[in-house]
Image (cartoon, helix red, strand yellow):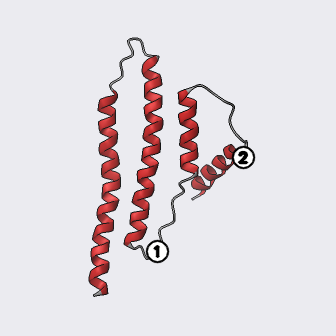
Amino acid sequence: MAQAERITTAIRELMSRGLPPKSTSPVRAAHTELVAALAGNPPRPIRLEVDSLDLDDRAEHVEKLLAAVHIYLTAILADTAENIPGGKLDRKYLDGLYSDFTGDAVGGIQKAAAELREHETWRAS
């Protein structure tokens, strides 16, 4: 909990400094977009008595979070590839791994939400 508070405080401090200096760096721009996406998409807390809507919301949050990180990661890897002698970096493989990871993370939460929705329907009848 204390770590989350420190991260939130650090993000607030960054945001309170105003707009960052203009930069033509795609990596800097991607970083700024990532911080804005994280700050604009805080997770809603899951209640003690979790329901399927809580899990649907969390799956959507994780999906947005991972999409923002993927955009940033892509910019970092593209910039890195430009600076590697020969410019070789197998991003297709990494993109596949990232896609699988995202599918597993979001899909697992969505599956749990569907199972809980089924249980809620059964309890209501």
Amino acid on which disc 1 is placed? Leu
The image position of residue 13, as x and y in percent, is: 70, 46
Q: Is 90 rendered above or below residue 115?
A: above
Residue farthest along the top direction in this orientation: 85
Q: Residue at x 53, y 35 (%)?
A: 30
The earlier-in-sequence mark between 1 and 2 is 2
The residue labelled by disc 2 is 16
The image position of residue 9, as x and y in percent, is: 66, 51
3D distance between C-alphas at marks 1 and 2 = 33 Å
Label 1 sits on a secondary structure element that is loop
Label 2 sits on a secondary structure element that is helix
Residue nearest the viewer, comparing 47 with 74: 74
Residue farthest along the bottom direction in this orientation: 125
Hey, which quadrant is residue 29 in on the image? Answer: top right
- For the N terminus, the image quarter is bottom right
The disc label shown at residue 108, or none: none
Q: Residue at x 31, y 86 (%)?
A: 124
- Badge 1: residue crowd in 10 Å (few <14, some 14–19, many ≥20): few
Residue nearest the viewer, comparing 9 with 125: 125
The image position of residue 83, as x and y in percent, is: 47, 16
The image position of residue 23, as x and y in percent, is: 63, 27
Amino acid on which disc 2 is placed? Ser
- Badge 2: residue crowd in 10 Å (few <14, some 14–19, many ≥20): few
The residue labelled by disc 1 is 48
